[in-house]
Image (tube, rainbow, N blue to C red):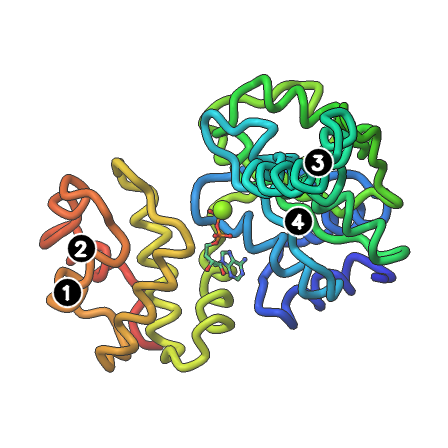
């Protein structure tokens, strides 16, 4: 699909995603080698968006498994549709089926609810030769048991349902795993994947992101916001803002018809980028003024 790393970078940009060369290389290799891509980084640096953009580029389905504490097989892989099974069993009884036949009937594919991991396997079977993008989002939130299960799945893409048998993917899906690194992942999982750390963007990159995502933002404003954010992230904050916050702020300031950063407006809109009162109090007033004063002036 992509002839080179440059092609990947260009295609992503065409879909509004600005990727460093390193990230574009990892994506290229992941697609090329059919290896899962593990993306780590702080919240809001663009990890989830990578998967969305790749599925748009490949014109394929995005199947997302959002991880959380206590995520189990019922929610990740499959679940029996109890209500439907109960109804069916009533009907079968009325029709005079015996118990064994009824049980065989209700533990079949028709009564299985496919959750994301089984959906991904099914997709490859239903769309010949096509691969969906399987996004396993924020895997660090799931417990280690689930990680071990995932490891097994990633090695062969087959799922065993005891009552039915083994369902094997026709091709491995494109797998993107993200982690906010609230805990370390197992080496075994990392070993199976290509790894890339997405850092907060450089000033230039963030400026490009603003201009790409928000073309109506004045260019001087975009340049100032990205410098301001860069400096802001160096302060000792409780919660460092990500790119999502930068974009919210740029949208807010644009909506307020601002073409550059002015301290009263900055103070009034800090809530777009800082979500803890301690951080707002820390930046509001003198600190914000100092940051604005340090921005390069007009040439
Ligand atoms: N490199 C980038 N290019 C374009 N948009 C980006 C980029 N990085 C982040 N964004 C935007 O920032 C927001 C947050 O990104 P997201 O992927 O949800 O972050 P994460 O999953 O790392 O928490 C999204 O609206 C996304 O479109
Ligand atoms: Mg995310």
| Mark pair 3, 2: CA separation | 64 Å
**Foreground: disc 3 or disc 2:** 3
Name above or below for residue 212 compared with residue 46. below
The mark found on residue 106 in the picture is 3
The mark found on residue 23 in the picture is 4
Looking at the image, tell me whether mark 1 or mark 4 is earlier in sequence order: 4
Q: Which of 205 and 213 is in front in this view?
A: 213
Q: Mark 2 points at which residue?
A: 288
Looking at the image, tell me whether mark 3 or mark 4 is earlier in sequence order: 4
Quadrant in which the N terminus appears: bottom right
Residue 203, picture quadrant:
bottom left
Q: Which of 218 and 40 is in front in this view?
A: 40
| Mark pair 1, 3: CA separation | 66 Å
Q: Which of 98 and 18 is in front in this view?
A: 98
Q: Where is residue 201 in the image (x, y as percent from the top left)?
A: 49, 52
Q: Is mark 2 on a helix, strand or loop?
A: helix
Looking at the image, tell me whether mark 2 or mark 4 is earlier in sequence order: 4
Label 1 close to label 2 by CB (< 8 Å): yes
| Mark pair 2, 4: CA separation | 32 Å
Q: Which residue is drawn at 68% across and 46% down?
A: 134
Residue 266, picture quadrant:
bottom left
**Foreground: disc 1 or disc 3:** 3
Q: What element carries label 3?
A: helix
Q: Position of residue 147 (x, y in %)?
A: 62, 23
**Foreground: disc 1 or disc 4:** 4
Judge whether residue 196 can be spotted in this image.
no
Q: Which residue is drawn at 56% across and 44% down?
A: 198
Q: Name the residue under label 1.
A: 263
């Amino acid at each position: 699909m992509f002839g080179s790393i440059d092609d990947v970078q260009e295609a992503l940009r065409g879909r509004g995603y600005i990727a460093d060369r390193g990230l574009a290389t990892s994506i290229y290799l992941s697609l090329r080698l059919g290896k899962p891509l593990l993306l780590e980084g702080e919240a809001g640096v663009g990890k989830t968006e990578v998967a969305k953009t790749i599925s748009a580029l490949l014109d394929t389905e995005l199947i997302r498994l959002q991880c959380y504490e206590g995520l189990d097989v019922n929610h990740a892989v499959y679940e029996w549709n109890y209500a439907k099974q109960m109804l069916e069993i009533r009907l079968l009884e009325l029709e005079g089926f015996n118990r064994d036949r009824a049980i065989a009937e209700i533990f079949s594919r028709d009564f299985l609810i496919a959750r994301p991991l089984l959906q991904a396997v099914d997709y490859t079977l239903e769309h010949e030769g096509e691969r969906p993008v399987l996004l396993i989002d924020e895997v660090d939130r799931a417990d280690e048991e689930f990680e071990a299960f995932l490891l097994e799945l990633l090695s062969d893409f087959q799922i065993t349902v005891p009552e039915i048998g083994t369902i094997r993917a026709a091709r491995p899906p494109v797998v993107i795993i993200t982690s906010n690194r609230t805990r370390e992942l197992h080496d075994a999982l990392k070993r199976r994947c290509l790894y890339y750390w997405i850092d907060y963007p450089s000033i230039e990159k963030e400026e490009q992101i603003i201009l790409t995502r928000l073309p109506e933002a004045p260019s001087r404003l975009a340049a100032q916001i990205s410098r301001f954010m860069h400096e802001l992230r160096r302060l000792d904050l409780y919660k460092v803002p990500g790119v999502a916050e930068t974009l919210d702020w740029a949208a807010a300031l644009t909506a307020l018809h601002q073409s550059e950063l002015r301290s009263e407006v900055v103070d009034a809109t800090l809530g777009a980028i800082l979500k803890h009162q301690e951080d707002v109090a820390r930046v509001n007033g003198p600190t914000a003024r100092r940051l604005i004063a340090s921005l390069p002036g007009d040439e």
